[in-house]
Amino acid sequence: MNKRVLVIDDEENIVELIKFNLELNEMDVAVEYDGLEGYLKAKEMKPDLVLLDLMLPGINGLDVCKRIRSDKEIGGTPIIMLTAKDMEDDKISGLDVGADDYITKPFSIKELIARVNAVMRRYEQGKEKKDEIIELDEIKIDLRNYEVYKNGSKIELTLKEFELLRLLAQKRGEVLSRNFLLDKIWGYEYFGETRTVDVHIRHLRKKIEDNDKKPKYIETVRGVGYKFK
């Protein structure tokens, strides 16, 4: 079955270019040009991935991303943010609300296809993992179903947040540098962009810690990185 991609972008020429090339790569593509309509379309079709522009009529891309992430049915959908601004704050804002990746306009189609395939491949690899449970105190990580529970209640994580928690938990007690985490989870092209890791750690702490200001699970090792206690 072809992968289903939802493109939410108000620039028709870019949408047509993306749609044409994704379909050449045997993906089924739906499009929306408005933020609110895009969110409603995502709820309806439950896509395998969303390509989401930052600047949209209706509601902007950040708000669309927030709505998807807070939706119980589609909260785990991989999201790649598109932005015309090559500014670090815009990239960080996208990651901060739960985007799995970002790509800056103008972009090459080869790069876009590579990013789309990489994000969906990581998601599928996670779903295909052996039936394995990691239990750490109040936290239970279901590797097969990509689910995390705390005291029996399910915690909604993005793909990157799950991968980050899984890696930290599997290597619990070890100090993992930011660049190591970047390489393992985001890929070598992110080398040096360590703020990306910090943003996701901050998000993760808010979801799994009782008090994210005094973390019980994820410890910061100053000047190096993080470890799962």
Image (cartoon, helix red, strand yellow):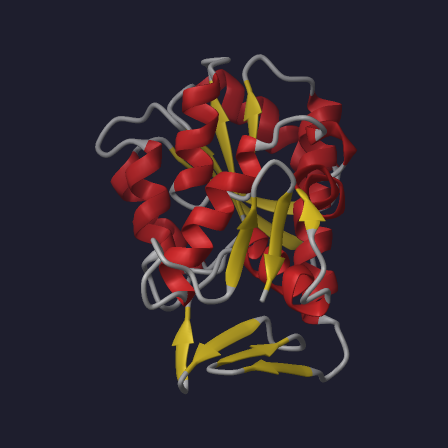
Does any portion of residue 38 appear in the rendered image? no
Q: Position of residue 221 (x, y in %)?
A: 59, 47
182 sits to left or right of 222: right
Q: Residue at x 49, y 27 (%)?
A: 82
- Residue reaching furthest front? 222
Does any portion of residue 64 appear in the rendered image? yes
**Quadrant in the rendering for residue 11:** top left
Location of residue 191 with respect to 132 vertically, above or below: above
Q: Position of residue 51 (x, y in %)?
A: 51, 37
Q: Residue at x 56, y 41 (%)?
A: 222
56 sits to left or right of 121: left
Location of residue 47 with respect to 141 vertically, above or below: above
Give the position of the N terminus as an image quadrant: bottom right
Q: Position of residue 120 (x, y in %)?
A: 67, 51
Between 175 and 168, the one nearer to me in the picture: 175
Q: Residue at x 42, y 66 (%)?
A: 208
- Residue reaching furthest left? 58
Q: Residue at x 70, y 61 (%)?
A: 124
